[in-house]
Image: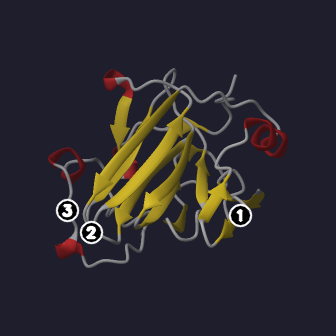
Amino acid sequence: MQFIRTEIEDVVIIEPKVHGDERGYFVETYRQDKLEEFLGFKVNFCQDNESKSSKGVLRGLHYQLAPFAQTKLVRVIQGRVLDVAVDIRDGSPTFGEYVAVELSAENKRQLFVPRGFAHGFVVLEDDTIFAYKVDNYYSPENDRGIAFDDEFIGIEWPLPIEELKLSEKDKKQPLLAHADLFNYEDNLYA
């Protein structure tokens, strides 16, 4: 298992080792000890989620406020997405910047999205199955989002806007300038 820091150091790509032969493959998708050793802090995932989507579905940009902020470890079981993590820690040197990584059933990559980041993805193939672990339970009262097309962030989505399929909730998300944010100085893992 290889851990790769991205342009935003706290967001990490994980490349598991795939053991394959004519029968198929085996892959270890999660090792808490190795992840914590790399990160230097504890992460206790408590819930697994899964979604199935058609090409063009855009989910996000979502996050939860403290005390229900969530770390996510995301991957694709079937199909392909462009996965995005946006730094929304006010005062961070990378505030408003994002990391975008293609995750697919073929490349088996995963993305570690820490607390203090908004997360979203756009589906690039029909029948894509997306799975993720979170370290805090869903809290409707703390559920927040940011507009996927906020020009300040400037995400370069790989599909034309007219091909994107969004929920009513995601069509109405505020711009980053009007969103509830995290404070960069706060220890979100305390």
Residues at marks 1 and 2, CA–CA distance in whole angstroms: 29 Å
Residue 138 location, quadrant? top left
Residue 147: where, in percent of width, then height? Answer: 31, 54
Q: Is residue 67 above or below residue 132?
A: above
Q: Relative to 127, is 43 on the left or the right?
A: right
Q: Looking at the image, is mark 3 or mark 2 earlier in the sequence?
A: 2
Numbered badge on residue 19: 1
Q: Which residue is disc 2 drawn over?
A: 55
Circle 2 crowding by C-alpha within 10 Å: few under 14, some 14–19, many from 20? some
Q: Is residue 156 above or below residue 15?
A: below
Residue 142: where, in percent of width, then height? Answer: 38, 26
- Amino acid type, residue under disc 1 in the picture: His
- Amino acid type, residue under disc 3 in the picture: Lys
Q: Looking at the image, is mark 3 or mark 1 earlier in the sequence?
A: 1
Q: Relative to 155, is 114 on the left or the right?
A: right
The residue under the point 70% across, 58% down is 16
- Amino acid type, residue under disc 2 in the picture: Lys
> SS class of the residue under badge 2?
loop
Numbered badge on residue 165: 3
Q: Is residue 159 above or below residue 70?
A: below
The residue under the point 27% across, 69% down is 55
The residue under the point 45% across, 24% down is 137
Residue 62: where, in percent of width, then height? Answer: 39, 44
Which of 59 and 170 lies nearest the eye of the viewer?
59
Residue 44 location, quadrant? top right
Q: Relative to 103, is 167 on the left or the right?
A: left
Which of 171 and 17 lies nearest the eye of the viewer?
17
> SS class of the residue under badge 1?
strand
**Residue 147 seen from this side:** no
Residues at marks 3 and 2, CA–CA distance in whole angstroms: 9 Å
